[in-house]
Image (cartoon, rainbow, N blue to C red):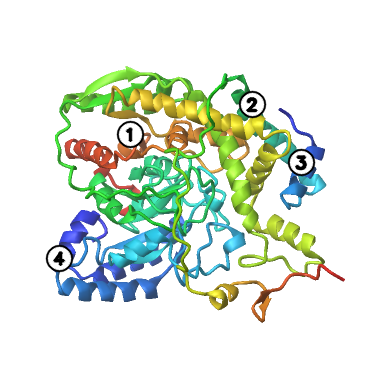
Amino acid sequence: MAVDTSTIAKMASLARIEISDAESGEAAARISQVLDLVDQLQAVDTQGVTPMAHPLDAVQRLRPDDVTEPDQRDTFQSLAPAAEAGLYLVPRVIE
Amino acid sequence: MHTKTIAELVQGLRSKAFSSVELTRHYLERIQARDATYNSYITVTPELALAQAEAADARLAQGDAPALCGVPIAHKDIFCTNGVRTSCGSKMLDNFIAPYDATIVDNYRRAGAVTLGKTNMDEFAMGSSNETSYYGPVKNPWATDCVPGGSSGGSAAAVSALLAPGATASDTGGSIRQPAALCGLTGIKPTYGRVSRWGMIAFASSLDQAGVLTRTAEDAALMMNDLASYDPKDSTCVEMPVPDYTAELNNPIKGLTIGVPKEYFSEGLDPKTAQIVEDAIKLYEQLGATIKSISLPHTHLAVPAYYVIAPAECSANLSRFDGVRYGYRCEDPKDLTDMYMRTRSEGFGEEVKRRILVGTYALSTGYYDAYYNKAQQVRRLIKRDFVEAFESVDVIMGPTSPSPAFAFGAKTKDPVAMYLEDIYTIATNLAGLPGLSIPCGLVDNKPVGLQLIGDYFAESKLLNVAHQFQQATDHHQQVAPSALD
């Protein structure tokens, strides 16, 4: 299935990725190539086939609700581009 | 020392032929002198390595040290390594110093193995040629004008160039086995769930699995013993005992039934590669195995299903890179949206962005059933093919990759051509089965890989079958000419 540049723009916005007008045409062409490839799936009869999410059909394990990890906030925040007083800093969102 | 296998190094350390410090220094010097040619390491960790080597020597002197104690290895830069930059081959994580060890890194650390450094890779493991790395392409030690394969291209080139005796790697669609084939190595991707994914930077979580690249099946078995573990921190990790993977290496393979899928020898396979792979399978017949022609009828759907599932999962996994908590952040963002947009646009490379967009499309309103759900259904059909096949065969064999190493740039303009590089390896990931590649000959002086696929948790069997081939042949002893210059 071919996608046009407006679809690319919409996906880019959803994915929070900037695609310039100059890049958009090539991105649409290459992504259309990939979608052509995956469109082969549409011809397969999958009626009644359960989708497979885990190769061993495992289910989520439960564990007791105990504290298992120590607090490492300071260590983790030391990696942040901007942090202060235990908070992550981002550009102002409320005027 | 650099020509020795891990098994030989284990012996040498115990017989005091050399110490771990001597061995580690030797590898560090080789990396320093030679890696400019290959670009196989992103980060070399000499101080960490020598401190670990000293500790290993002390432990070896006391006796009863674990097998890999004192053996230097390299880790693919997808595995978090405490206090060491863990970039995943991306500008996004160029400044990321991991604050903890991945479970598998911790396993090797506790076993006393020495960390030489972190190896180059395709960005976020997305690629089959190691050309998408932010740190530049890796060269194939067999032919430096060709790619080493990917995404574990750095690990493969490092081991092939004798800059590490073994390395960790990861495989989402063939990223261990294809570089193993292109660099003349043994590479194993275990059963999904056999190895913890905790601390391995996620690409496609239902497909990703860690494994190793070595020069022999025996070395792979030694490394597997510390790689595999049950880890409560990975909810998809399977709780079952870890066998000694070296225990069955010497079992005779007389009576083994090998299934050869006709779909793996069809259009697109290089004829010279096909011939070498067929010859390798014939050799198994001489070793007492029975060859059986089989069919895996949904093979042609593996690549299409993969290129829905992997991008969909990648678009979800990579949404965490937002410039807030760690990693890259753009300069002077004017507001929050601008920060997200520019951080991600500047931090990710072209292939990563393409896959995020394809994944976003496949998961978007109105398309989920047509793409993601459909692909997950097809995935089950692919798994059923294998389950049925394993009712009458012990292992499946075929080529690992459709051709030997190709030139830089040969497939970068056409994403689909690059994706077809993994046509024989992807189905194994979709089904969650273990797969292994061993060298089985050369085409135009470039290595060819034979792929072995096993039933769930049959890693010991695969290693046994690979080891028996290596007892009867010397393909695995061939060394890339540039490594010995």
Image vertical order of residue A82 relative to residue A13, above or below: below
Both on one chain, marks 3 and 2? yes
- Nearer to me, B167 or B235: B235
Q: Residue at x 67, y 60 (%)?
A: B322
Tell me how far mark 3 sits from mark 2, CA to CA.
Answer: 18 Å
For badge 4, the amino acid type reads Arg
Closer to viewer: mark 2 or mark 4? 2
- Which x, y percent locates residue B261? 37, 22
- Residue denoted by label 2: A39
Q: Earlier in the sequence, mark 3 or mark 2?
A: 3
Residues packed near mark 3 inside 10 Å, few (<14), some (14 to 19) or many (20 plus): many
Image vertical order of residue B258 relative to residue A74, above or below: above
Tell me how far mark 1 sits from mark 3, CA to CA.
Answer: 41 Å
Both on one chain, marks 1 and 4? yes
Tell me how far mark 1 sits from mark 2, CA to CA.
Answer: 30 Å
- Residue denoted by label 3: A8
Q: Residue furthest left?
A: B15
Q: Residue at x 15, y 41 (%)?
A: B250
- Residue denoted by label 1: B455
The quarter of the rendered structure image containing the N terminus of chain B is bottom left
Q: Is residue B157 visible?
A: no
- Chain at tag 3: A
The quarter of the rendered structure image containing the C terminus of chain B is bottom left
- Nearer to me, B286 or B84: B84
For badge 3, the amino acid type reads Ile
- Disc sitting over residue B14 in the figure: 4
